[in-house]
Image: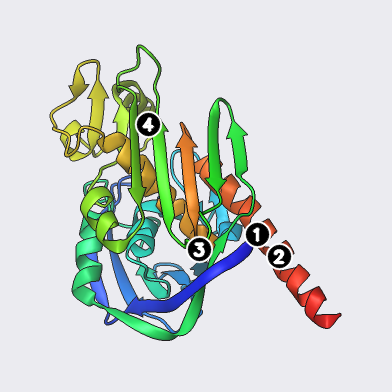
Amino acid sequence: MHIVATRPQRTVARTVTLEGIGLVTGAAVRVRFHPASPDSGIVFYRRDQPGAPAIHARVSAAIGTCRRTTLGTAGQGITLVEHLLAALAGLRIDNCWVELDGPEPPGLDGSAAAYVRLLLQAGVVVQNRPRCIWAVQQPLTVRREGATLTLYPPPPGSAELRLSYLLDYGTYGPIPQQRYTVRLTPGEFAREVANCRTFVTAAEARQLREQGIGRHLRPADIVVFGNRGPLDNRLRFADEPARHKILDLIGDLALFGADLAGHVVAYRSGHTLNVELVRRLCQMQTDAECGRTTACAA
């Protein structure tokens, strides 16, 4: 793994606030985005907990990946962080302090659109520190239970990241097979990905409600697929589920803590595989940095 380019780091220009209801708990919650100094990264603060513990948005803090990504500790963690992280990463906001007064960010409509609008209103400040863009030199693949996720090297001289997702619920599944590819830039993210909502099948929705998750939600609040399509709702794109999977992937890849170049190709992957790929990348990054340090010392 090696660095192919750098770009200036960025943060928000001013503090902005958003209030809403958590998708998981149904509790009212407030989130504040604050400017942060270069090399700070994305740091969450649970203001409702004693001492307002800090939780860094790095893969080392990931403690749960079942249907959503959870960071922190069991008692003071933050769950369903991927939509908020996708908004920051999609807009290339690298340094930000994120205050929360609850265990999850506002769920809103299950997309990142409201976060993107808020962050664009806040404005962006370019900072006088570089952010590295890393790439693999050979394809890196992780697999699990019929799903695969691969990061391919970029073409020579390219620092661009592309993401492709193939969604496949099987021949008789409630959601037709879908494929979507996007070039990750702030403009493309805001236009094509940010407003794509989280989705479940009707059977999955019943299981979640039995677990006490999302009991406050109606089918119209997110996207619930029955046998004949969305219940009490309409898709924003014909391939909205595949696009939302890319939104989730962008949020999970943000846990790498640096930019990536190349082409990420996902087949049926979810949070568990996404986070596993980031763990592998972080180990490769550490090995590469150790190699450079050793070479310099020699």
Give the mark nearest the N terminus, 3 or 4: 3
What separation in Å lies between label 2 and label 3 (alpha carbons)? 20 Å
Q: Residues within 10 Å of mark 4 (few under 14, many from 20)?
A: some
User: Judging from the image, what secondary structure is the residue with disc 1 in?
Assistant: loop
User: Dots 2 and 1: beta carbons under 8 Å?
Assistant: yes
Give the mark nearest the N terminus, 1 or 3: 1
Q: Is residue 296 left or right of residue 272?
A: right
Q: Residue at x 47, y 63 (%)?
A: 159
User: Judging from the image, what secondary structure is the residue with disc 4 in?
Assistant: helix
Q: Which mark is residue 1?
A: 1
Mark in front: 1 vs 3:
3
Circle 3 sits on which residue? 157
Give the mark nearest the N terminus, 2 or 3: 3
Circle 2 sits on which residue? 288
Residue 269: x and y in percent read 48, 36
Q: Which mark is residue 208?
A: 4
